[in-house]
Amino acid sequence: MLVSGNHKKRLKAASSFVLRLSLLMALFLSLSFIASAAEGADLEVSILRYEPVPAEIGEYVSVWVKVENLGYAKADDLSIQMVPDYPFSVDSSENALVNIGILTPDNAAVHEYRLYTDSAAKQGTGTFEVWYQEESDNTWFKKEFELRVGSESFDSKGTIQLVGEPVKEPEVFIPGDEGTISFTLQNSATDYTVTIDDEQYDTNARIQSASLEGTEGIKITTGTYYGNGVIGPGESVDLTYNLEVADDIPDGTYYLDFSIVGSSHSYNSNWRIPVKVDSSSVRVIPSKPLSLENGEGTLEFDVANIHPNELSSVSVILEAEDIEFSPSEYFIGSMDSDELFTIEIDAKAVSDDITFPVDLIITADYRNGLNEHVEEIGKRQLQHHVVENSNGSGIYVAVILILVVGAGAYYFYRKKKQESE
C-alpha cells in the first residue's frame, strides 16, 4: 500500500509526540520517586547499651534500643518490635511491640527491653533482631544485634579504681575536633589476700568490660574494651578511647559515661567524665596604624592565644591585592593560653594602579592537638600616605652653608696674610 508524503509526516509527528510524552512521564515518575524518598524519615537503629555484661545465664538482661531520625522529615507513626532468637526471649509478648509515635528529624527515641537468657544457654554470643517501621501498614525493616552471654563471676576481692584525672588530648576541644581520652584503672588492693568471715580470698581484680558512651554532639568511635586476665594488687591498666566533636556543637561542658564491669556485679563502677568545648582560638590585633608610606612599610600585630589550652604551629598570613608581604607567612610556633606575641611584617605595593584603601585579610593557621585549623581572623583596611622627599633641598642648603663658611674663612686668611706682609 502506498503512503502519501503528508501521511508519513503525520505518522512521524505522532511517533515523536508519543516518544516525548513517554519521556516526560518517566521523568515525572522519577522526580516523584525522588521527592517521596527525600520527604521520608531516615531511621537508624542501634543498641545504646545492655546490662549486665555479659548477659547472665538464667537471668534477665536490660537492653536499651535507640532509634534516631537522620532524615529531613518526621516519622509520623514509628513502631519498633523486639524479635529475639534463642537463648533470649522477651519478658512479656505484650512488651515486644512498642509504638513510639512521631519522631522529628535530628531526634532520637530510646526504649528499654528486658530479655530473659535461657538457663540452658551456653557461654558465647546470642542474637536478636529489632524491627521498625516508619508508619503503620508500611514495610517493616530489621537489624540484627549480638549480646555476650555468660555467667562470669569471680570471688576475687580486688577493686578497680580510676586513678587521677582522665587525660584528654587536646585538653579542651574546638568544634569539629577529633581526639582521645585515656584512663588509668588500678587495683586498689595492697595485699595479695584478704580474710572475710574466716574465709580467705585473693585480691586480684578483673575488668570484664569497660565502655565509654558519648552524648549529643560528641561521638565515641572506639568500641567496648573486654578484658582478659587479672590485675594484681597495685597493678594498673591504661585504656584509650577516640572521640569526634560535631562541627555545630555549642561551647560548654559535656559529660560522658564511663562504665566498667568488674569481678562481679557488686564491683561495677560508673563515672561521669567532663569534656570541655570552647571555640575561642587566636586573635590578631594591629598594634599600630595599618598604613604604608610611598608604597611600603612595616605592619605590626599582637597575636594572642585566648583558647584555654596550648595551641601549636601558630602562624599568621596576610593577603591584599597587589601587595607583597615578607615573610609571606609569619610562623610563631607553640603558644600557651593567654600568651601574647608581637610580630612585624614588611609590606610593599607591587603595582602603580592600586586604589587605597585596600582590604587586608588576616588568616591564622594553628593546631589544637592533632587538629589543624585555618581561620580567617578578620578583614581590615590598609591605608596609604605619600610623603614628599625633602633630602635634596636639605643637601642643597648644606652645600651653600659650607661654601659660605669656606669663603669667609678664606677671606680672613688672605686678609691676615696681607697684614703680616
Image (spheres, rainbow, N blue to C red):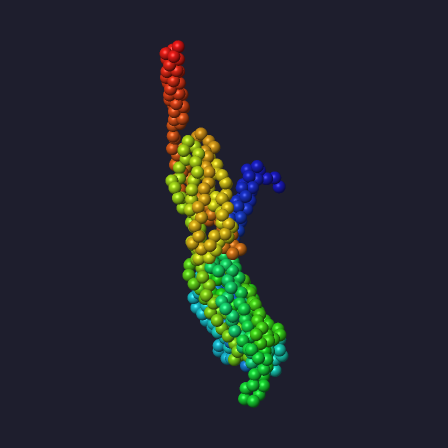
- Whether residue 108 is situated above or below residue 263 in the rendered picture: above
Horizontal and vertical percent position of residue 36: 48, 57
Q: Quadrant of the C terminus?
A: top left
How many numbered markers are drawn?
0
Horizontal and vertical percent position of residue 45: 52, 66
- Whether residue 391 is situated above or below residue 65 in the rendered picture: above
Query: In this orientation, does residue 107 appear?
Result: no
| Residue lying at 41% horizontally and 35% vertically, measured from the top left | 292
| Residue lying at 62% horizontally and 73% vertically, measured from the top left | 228
| Residue lying at 62% horizontally and 41% vertically, measured from the top left | 1
- In front of the other: 339 or 220: 339
Query: In this orientation, does residue 192 appear?
Result: yes
Horizontal and vertical percent position of residue 183: 53, 67
- In front of the other: 29 or 163: 163
Residue lying furthest front: 420
Residue lying furthest bottom: 198
- In front of the other: 7 or 118: 118
Horizontal and vertical percent position of residue 328: 50, 41
- Whether residue 372 is situated above or below residue 139 in the rendered picture: above
| Residue lying at 44% horizontally and 29% vertically, measured from the top left | 352
